[in-house]
Image: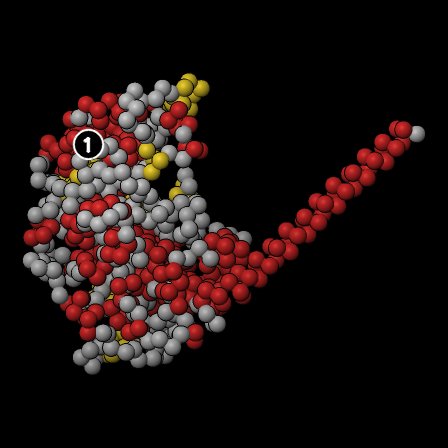
Amino acid sequence: MAVESKNTAHRTSSLRLWFTIGVLLVFVCCLSGYDLYDSWHRGTKVLLGDSGRNSPVYFAYRESLHDSKYKGGKYRNLNGRTLRDRSLLAMTETNVSSLLRHNTASSTKSVDDYDTRNSAHLTAEDSTYTINDPGGNHMVHSLREAQESSSDNIGKLDSPRETQDGSSDTIQKSNSTRTTEEGSDNGVNKPDLPPLKQKHRMLIDTPPPGYVRPSTTTLAPFTKSWNDPVDCALLYKENKYEIKHALERRTRIVAQVSYDYSPVLDAESCDSYVAAAGYVTDILSEEEKNFPLAFAIRMHNNPVQAERLLKAIYRPQNYYCIYVDKKADNNTHTVMAKIVGCLRNVFLASHTNNYIYASFSAVEADMQCMKDLAQRSDSWKYFMNMAGTEFPLKTNLEIVRVLKVLNGTNDVEQYPFPKFYRKRIHKHHTAIGQTWTETRIPKKPFPDPAVTPQKGCAYNTLSRAFVEWVLTDDLAQRFINWTRDLYSPDEVVWATLNSLPQAPGGYSDVVAQMAKTFLSREVIWSNSVAYCHESKMVRGICIMSFLELGYLSRRWEFFANKFDIGYDPIVLDCLAESLVARTRKPDPDHYVHWGGVYRAPHVRRARGQDA
């Protein structure tokens, strides 16, 4: 009897358990269904206005979702719950404002009612100029085009528009192949736009003092590295039609450019290579001439992308140290050696080691380039280290203008070590093959109690005085040696040394990329508020695509990380096109986004304000 009673009680408890699980499953299913509904109907309406479902981003994602090519494929993460939770609700206010500019039905404001300082992505300014692409097409860009709101009616993409002199020009963004595939809609006219405000025109047409406008021989027009006609100006504006078109063309573009070494290896001479590649070979202003910079590029593969980075940041008055991983393949060493041999102020690091991720080899690379750059010249003002997977968001003049505001202060990310990262400094690590591995051996604290390890970023902007202090100071050298067996010591060394009272240009303020007070880098982490549209992550960092162009155009940071030319070359060419346009007609006061710069505590301190 007792055994039967126990069996009955056991069956009763099992039924209760399964009933509870069933109720939870029903609840989860209902919640998921609500999220899907809320994503397409309620979420877009709240953020984009009454006609939110006609917004460009929504339209492009919807088209990708319903297109049979993408169902269940690589773009399946663009639909449903992902869009609501991580794209729409995580957008910054500036991103939402940008989308609202496309929503003519929910806003009665004209284009002039918006501050054009939110449009740092413009590929050209008030006067038009022509960009040639290898396919023989000519794309005409202007500030007026970049400010045009996207029409909610299908088919109003390409249209003639009136210029200031009364003539009509047409945005030629397609060849005969594209017209055949997608249909010809060029006959539909867009509504007339109001004229630009006079203050905006003055900002654009007035160069900074001492700036010499480069001629076409000094700075050649930007040439895309691919033939498919993708309009970067429309991608910056998150145009729904161009997003869909770029998604369809990207695979073809990747096949054209991802690992093509021939422009470097097949060049007849250095002069022909430099001219064909589009390097800036003349000093463009006295301000930049009097403020040279030093760069250290750390790379281990993909020399084509590293060349893109070098070409974007190259100026004849600056100095560049290229640190190539010793175990990189022969093609990488050959290509980089030929590039370095053609540019007098670019050189390879005098000594290299095998690079192991998260090991002390990263600090060794930075220290080696610091020594080489310090010996090469005594004129540069700031040192910037970077990876070959980064790309600039600002021109050289714009970076110089911000660094002059810093006035010798470093830009280093630093904050107290989070608890979940403390094992990195409390345990001994060692290399097992090509992996930096934690051991059970406890790590002794640094003997000087006045030095408290800080967490930060591996890539920073350091003043010349700080670099010389790091290379010669006994305390700095002892602390660097102490970090040899830490995990990611490059994220500890610069942050900790910068926090010391005796560090030149250092400070005690908390500066963090997640708080958007770190000027050197923009990174979209897996837990960032900013959304990684295609959710492609490497070690928790978003691999940015052209879907991030609108977001990047509103950033005030110097560089962004990461990019992969083998995944999305469109974003690199569009960023480069914007940099060339802003170099041809510079206006740092217009494009730097000073509001974001001035809110950083170390910038406030450098300006004599309370942090």
The correct choice, above or below, for 270 with respect to 213 in the image is: above
Count the numbered circles shown.
Answer: 1
Q: Residue at x 22, y 37 (%)?
A: 506
The answer, for residue 268, to whether it is visible in the render is no
Q: Residue at x 27, y 66 (%)?
A: 116
The correct choice, above or below, for 42 with respect to 339 in the image is: below
User: Between 288 and 609, which is closer to the camera in this rendering?
Assistant: 609
Amino acid type of the residue that numbered disc 1 sits on in the rendered structure = Gln
Q: Residues within 10 Å of mark 1 (few under 14, many from 20)?
A: few
Tell me how the rendering is colored: secondary structure
The answer, for residue 199, to whether it is visible in the render is yes
Q: Residue furthest right?
A: 1
Please state, as top left, top right, bottom left or bottom right, where the N terminus lies in the image. top right
Which secondary structure lies at badge 1? Answer: loop
In the image, taking residue 332 as reference, residue 249 lies left or right, namely: right
Q: Residue at x 40, y 23 (%)?
A: 427
Q: Residue at x 40, y 30 (%)?
A: 422
Q: Residue furthest front?
A: 610
> For residue 173, what is the image quadrant?
bottom left
> For residue 31, what is the image quadrant?
bottom right
User: Between 436 and 18, which is closer to the camera in this rendering?
Assistant: 18
User: Between 538 and 69, which is closer to the camera in this rendering?
Assistant: 538
Q: Residue furthest top?
A: 441
> For residue 575, what is the image quadrant?
bottom left
Q: Position of residue 238 (x, y in %)?
A: 37, 63
Q: Position of residue 164 (x, y in %)?
A: 20, 78
What residue is pinned by disc 1? 502
User: Between 207 and 138, which is closer to the camera in this rendering?
Assistant: 207
Q: Position of residue 178 (x, y in %)?
A: 37, 66
The correct choice, above or below, for 251 with respect to 469 in the image is: below
Q: Residue furthest bottom?
A: 166
In the image, taking residue 299 as reference, residue 292 lies left or right, namely: left
